[in-house]
Image (cartoon, rainbow, N blue to C red):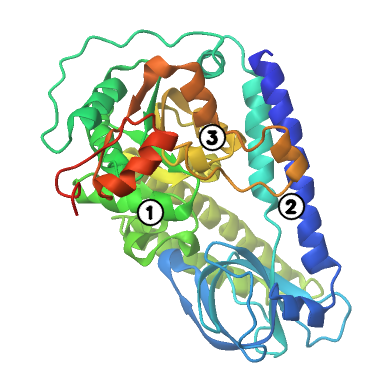
Amino acid sequence: MSSRAQLQQTLALIQLERQADLEQYRQKVLMRSLSQRTKEGVTWYPVRLKRDYIGTGERIILELERTNHLDQPHSFQSGKLVSLFCNASGKPEKEHTNGVVNYVSDNVLVITLNGDDLPDWIDNGLLGVDVMFDEMTYKEMESALRTVIKAEDNRLAELREILFGDDKPSPAQQIEFTPSPLLNESQNSSLRQITSTPDVAFVHGPPGTGKTTTLVQAIVATVKTEQQVLVTTPSNAAIDLLVEKLSEQGLQVVRLGHPARVTEQTLSKTLDARIAGHAHYAELRGLRKKLEQLKGMASQYKRNFGHHEREQRRLMKEEVKVLKSDADMLEFYIINDVLNKADVLCCTLVGASHGNLRGRKFKTVFIDEAAQALEAACWIPILKAQRVILAGDHCQLPPTIKSSEAAAQGLNQTLLEKCIALHPEAVTLLEEQYRMNQTIMGYSSSVFYENKLKAHHSVANA
């Protein structure tokens, strides 16, 4: 089967998965009454607004408290899209606004609103929160697959043919390589492979073998020659770990993504935080403040006022347009200045579609935890790549698939798993593990890793 035919099949399977996911959401949320949704844990109702405040990037954060069903298990977790609603109007169409969950602790839910203002109805009481269906992830995966299918006579088309085995990767370049004293022999072999490949490299990292350590050193080495790289993972937790490790190496790291999905330790590295710390940010805030004041003044002049008032309103609206244009241009400059000065840009696979990355290309894109990622999601960052490094362990659990039909037809087979089978010459297995003693390690080594693993002396007889 050609690469394009395989991608067409993957696209059809992603659409199957989307339908299954949406149907689960419909059954749990859309087709249930408020009381049923509350009992099943996909809705908190009623909730009490404990407090609201401005968080990172001047985003509005709400702290909400569940007031009944206190011991009820629920579906809320960090990063989930949610809808905050109000039933006080008594209308069938309840008022609502959307946000993202920062974290949940016992019966307290903290969310960041997607809008710029608190809703007018926030103090009316009868508030509730629904879990929402994440439509955007599927749209981005489908869009990426269609782009890869159409690619012709460009680098993306070449990578497609290489990754699907229709073409062989180019031979490793002859480079001067100095082994890192921080890495063991197999880790240094992986480092050599990553730094010398012109196309693709695959790091197979069983549990405890130091995959993250190896990747961090590979990223450090790559930044020295390429100035900037893109690093991605399927989950927020995994990318936040890499942000911390890379920052410890002294690299300038920018974490893209919604601040609500970022750990407390990583917040200072987010794009929002970097913008707020920029030398021209005070100027931007001043423009925005003046803009809001003018908009407020202009709204006081109604259409049925006299000619003088209408003229004043028109002049203010013109000034608002000019100020908004100035603010947008300054924000654009600040964002690009922050991104251009970064050594490493970090985001989730889907986050690589972030508008602020539009049009940007990278000589090297790293995808960690690739064995836990849907193939379609991996193509999103690959769209921006000249060469690709995939790391993970396909012998561990695959990504979760909700459609049994899609899973049976191969959606649970990851891009990493396919590539390791097609390109064994581009794979390095990290062989020395630091987590288990020889006896415990022996079982997994024999069953999954062809008896190639060995325990480091510090744990071998522990």
Please name the amino acid that badge 2 sits on. Answer: Asp
Report the disc number at residue 176.
none
209 or 390: nearer the viewer: 209
Mark 3 or mark 1: which comes first in sequence?
A: 1
Residue that carries the numbered disc 1 in the rendered image: 240
Q: CA distance from mark 3 to mark 1?
A: 18 Å
* Residue 452 found in image quarter: top left
Residue that carries the numbered disc 2 in the rendered image: 21
Residue that carries the numbered disc 3 in the rendered image: 378
243 or 203: nearer the viewer: 203
Residue 155 seen in this snapshot: yes
Please name the amino acid that badge 3 sits on. Answer: Cys
Q: How crowded is the residue under tag 3: few (<14 C-alpha within 10 Å), some, or many (20+)?
A: many
Viewer-side label of 2, 1: 2
Q: CA distance from mark 2 to mark 1?
A: 26 Å
Mark 2 or mark 3: which comes first in sequence?
A: 2
Please name the amino acid that badge 1 sits on. Answer: Asp
- Residue 415 % position (x, y): 54, 30
